[in-house]
Image (cartoon, helix red, strand yellow):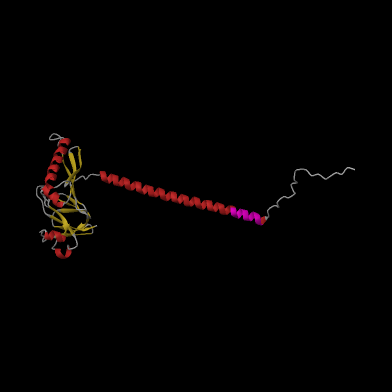
Amino acid sequence: MTNYKSRTTGMRSRNNGARPRPGVASRELQEARRRKRQREVMRNRIIFGTCLLAFALLLIFIIVKLIGLALNAGKSSDTSTLTFAADGKVVFEEVTDFDTDTYSKSELKSYTNDLIKSFNDTYGSKAISLDKLRVKGDKAYLKTTYKDADCYSAFTSYTTYNASYTDAVEAGYDFGVLFSQVADDKLLEAGVINADTEFADYNVAIVNENITVTVPGDIAYVSNADVELIDSDTITISQADGNSDATDMVYIIYSTK
């Protein structure tokens, strides 16, 4: 008698060994995990976006600063200006009439370089440097740098000084003149000042020509003369009668920045 063994197919029943369907609690847990992952992704995106924005703003700030520096570096004064730098150097920007019928730009440059070379050969190497020479229309612009006020004075023959008040007194300069104080961006009426008391902690620039002057600090007092306060560190010296050949000795008392 033949015995028949029960056979099963190679396929498992869908219900045999099947995992139980997840309950409500399990589905809630999965949903909570999904929401948590979404929040983390969103947070990371926000952080990344904020970093990108900060970097972009910093980059824009740097670019604007560089453009400003480049523009200022190439900017030329439109009037003759004497600038006393904080390191003691003196920068002279000269704006003068230029007549092409008298000489050319190349002749002007050659003449200027010869003057500077001749002076440097006797006064000292690199005492004066020619920084820029430009001709536009009937105007010539020259920018020269002098190693100090004494060098500028020796080259131009204009009395020029820049040091502390104490050093100026020791050098023989007389402060027994009327001074106008600067207050509220204006020059007040000139009066007698006790220089030893008022100027002891200040520096002084002394100029004897009709020119715009910039000092490396805030101007506190100016000796009585025909001057105009342009900015906190700048004045223009001129003559009331328009006589450009006449000059006054002007004392500019300033605090260092």
- Percent from the top left, x then y, of residue 25? 66, 57
Camera-side residue of 93 and 153:
153
Q: Residue at x 63, y 55 (%)?
A: 28
**Which secondary structure is most common in the magenta stretch?**
helix
Left/right placement of residue 257 relative to residue 13 reads left
Q: Residue at x 56, y 54 (%)?
A: 36
**Is residue 146 part of the magenta span, yes or no?**
no
Picture quarter with the N terminus: top right
Left/right placement of residue 182 relative to residue 32 reads left
Q: Which residue sits furthest right? A: 1
| Location of residue 98 (image quadrant) | top left
- Percent from the top left, x then y, of residue 121? 13, 44
- Is any atom of residue 198 visible in this view? yes
- Percent from the top left, x then y, of residue 239? 12, 50
Q: Residue at x 28, y 44 (%)?
A: 71
Picture quarter with the C terminus: bottom left
- Percent from the top left, x then y, of residue 103? 13, 35
Camera-side residue of 52 and 241:
52
Count of numbered marks:
0
| Location of residue 202 (image quadrant) | bottom left
**Is residue 27 part of the magenta span, yes or no?**
yes
Q: Which residue sits furthest top? A: 101
Range drawn in magenta: 25-33
- Is any atom of residue 188 visible in this view? no
